[in-house]
Image: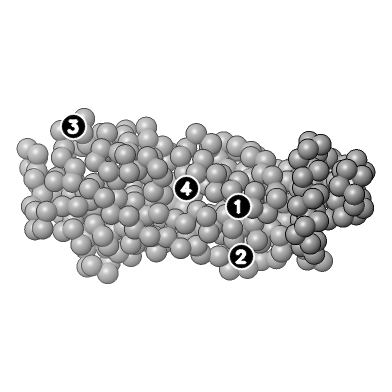
């Protein structure tokens, strides 16, 4: 900074103000200092700044799987939002491992970051019983009550919106693909059931299809098993995320089932791949930019407060919209074509509710 100050003909304090983004510097002075910064190739020494200020200038983002498109796109939104704040994002992949998620909740990333954004899959409610003493925001829905701040879409409302759309297309035998032990899975199942109840459509146990995780392979395998069974052909698949839906589309195509003529498909996430699936996939699009901005704002507020860690609050629900594409658009009043299957007594005799 002394070199830059001498080059620009200003004080070291002025250089520090420009580098730190302090607003009360005249435009002419800021431009002169910036020219010197550029000419001398100045780079911030973040380690030295951290030792002096107690801040690193980094935030950590922990997601389950970077290979899954939704989490990759979420990470990109966080990186962009952080860059506008002059903050660098360190990205950690947890693999959905509950022990890794527990360690992060216990402060496992605070040695390298000023705050943590955590998208957890499996961490149980009791893991968050001890209040963290560092800035922390959860992304998505988790079974931790209101003890920790969260940002995400309303999963129940999103699922209900998808199923209402399928009902509007004349579908009645709608598969819910994705039930598992997660809070996301529970909430999306609840939204599915709420939409059926409002339309006075009886829920059927075998149409709620469990999976181990939300991947293309799990979607493909689950739908192939369903199609190989003895039950009647469903007329729609509501997949709990796009990866499951894309696997389902491949299984339907491999079995010679027409989409959407025989089976409509819709899901949640609207990753970029959805628009290029065959056929293009109807999906709920969460506003990832809003999620990233709100989460980082909550981290900043925690860092600026006098409290040691995050205060509990109601979940911050980000907006979403239904993007309708070819995969769910059935012709008006189109009958369900049975593809050679006979109607099965399995449907008529299945009990209501239950999972």
The answer, for residue 179, to whether it is visible in the render is no
**Disc marking residue 181:** 4
What residue is disc 1 on? 81
Q: Residue at x 42, y 60 (%)?
A: 320
Between marks 3 and 4, how big is the CA–CA gap? Answer: 29 Å
Q: Tell me which numbered mark, 1 or 4, is placed earlier along the sequence.
A: 1
168 relative position to 355: left or right: left
First in sequence: mark 3 vs mark 4: 4
Tell me: residue 18, above or below residue 277. below
Measuring from the top left, give residue 150's x and y in whole percent: 59, 60
Indicate the secondary structure of the residue bearing disc 3: loop
* Percent position of residue 330, x then y: 15, 52
Q: Mark 1 touching mark 3, by CB under 8 A?
A: no
Q: Earlier in the sequence, mark 1 or mark 3?
A: 1
Q: Which badge, 2 or 4, is on the more N-terminal residue?
A: 2
Mark seen at residue 255: 3
The mark closer to the camera, 1 or 3, is 1
Of tags 2 and 4, the one toward the viewer is 2
Sequence order check: which comes first, mark 3 or mark 2? 2
Q: Earlier in the sequence, mark 2 or mark 1?
A: 1
In the rendering, at what x and y percent does residue 92 appear? 64, 38
Is residue 131 rendered to the left or right of residue 252? Answer: right
Q: Nearer the viewer, residue 304 or 129?
A: 304
Q: Are marks 1 and 4 in contact (CB under 8 Å)?
A: no
Q: Which residue is mark 2?
A: 146
Crowd band around label 3 with a 10 angstrom C-alpha radius: few (<14), some (14–19), many (20+): some
């Amino acid at each position: 900074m002394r070199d830059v100050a001498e080059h620009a003909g200003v004080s070291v304090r002025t250089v520090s103000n420009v580098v730190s983004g302090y607003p009360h510097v005249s435009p002419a002075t800021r431009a002169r200092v910036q020219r010197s910064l550029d000419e001398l190739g100045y780079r911030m020494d973040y380690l030295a700044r951290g030792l002096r200020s107690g801040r690193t200038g980094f935030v950590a983002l922990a997601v389950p799987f970077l290979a899954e498109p939704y989490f990759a796109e979420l990470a990109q939104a966080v990186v962009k939002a952080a860059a506008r704040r002059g903050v660098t994002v360190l990205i950690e992949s947890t693999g959905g491992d509950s022990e890794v998620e527990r360690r992060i909740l216990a402060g496992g990333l605070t040695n390298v970051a000023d705050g943590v954004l955590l998208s957890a899959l499996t961490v149980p409610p009791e893991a968050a019983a001890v209040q963290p003493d560092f800035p922390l925001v959860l992304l998505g829905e988790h079974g931790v009550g209101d003890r920790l701040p969260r940002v995400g879409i309303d999963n129940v409302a999103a699922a209900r919106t998808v199923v209402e759309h399928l009902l509007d297309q004349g579908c009645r035998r709608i598969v819910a693909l994705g039930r598992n032990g997660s809070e996301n899975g529970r909430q999306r199942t609840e939204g599915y059931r709420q939409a059926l109840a409002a339309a006075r459509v009886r829920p059927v146990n075998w149409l709620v299809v469990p999976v181990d995780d939300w991947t293309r392979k799990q979607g493909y395998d689950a739908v192939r098993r369903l199609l190989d069974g003895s039950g009647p052909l469903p007329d729609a698949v509501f997949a709990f995320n796009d990866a499951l839906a894309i696997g389902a589309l491949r299984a339907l195509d491999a079995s010679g089932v027409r989409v959407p003529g025989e089976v409509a498909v819709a899901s949640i996430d609207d990753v970029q791949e959805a628009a290029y699936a065959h056929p293009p996939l109807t999906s709920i699009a969460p506003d990832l930019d809003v999620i990233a901005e709100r989460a980082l704002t909550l981290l900043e507020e925690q860092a600026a407060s006098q409290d040691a860690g995050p205060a509990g609050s109601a979940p911050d629900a980000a907006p979403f919209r239904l993007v309708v594409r070819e995969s769910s658009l059935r012709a008006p009043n189109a009958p369900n074509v049975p593809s050679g299957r006979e109607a099965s007594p399995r449907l008529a005799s299945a009990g209501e509710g239950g999972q």
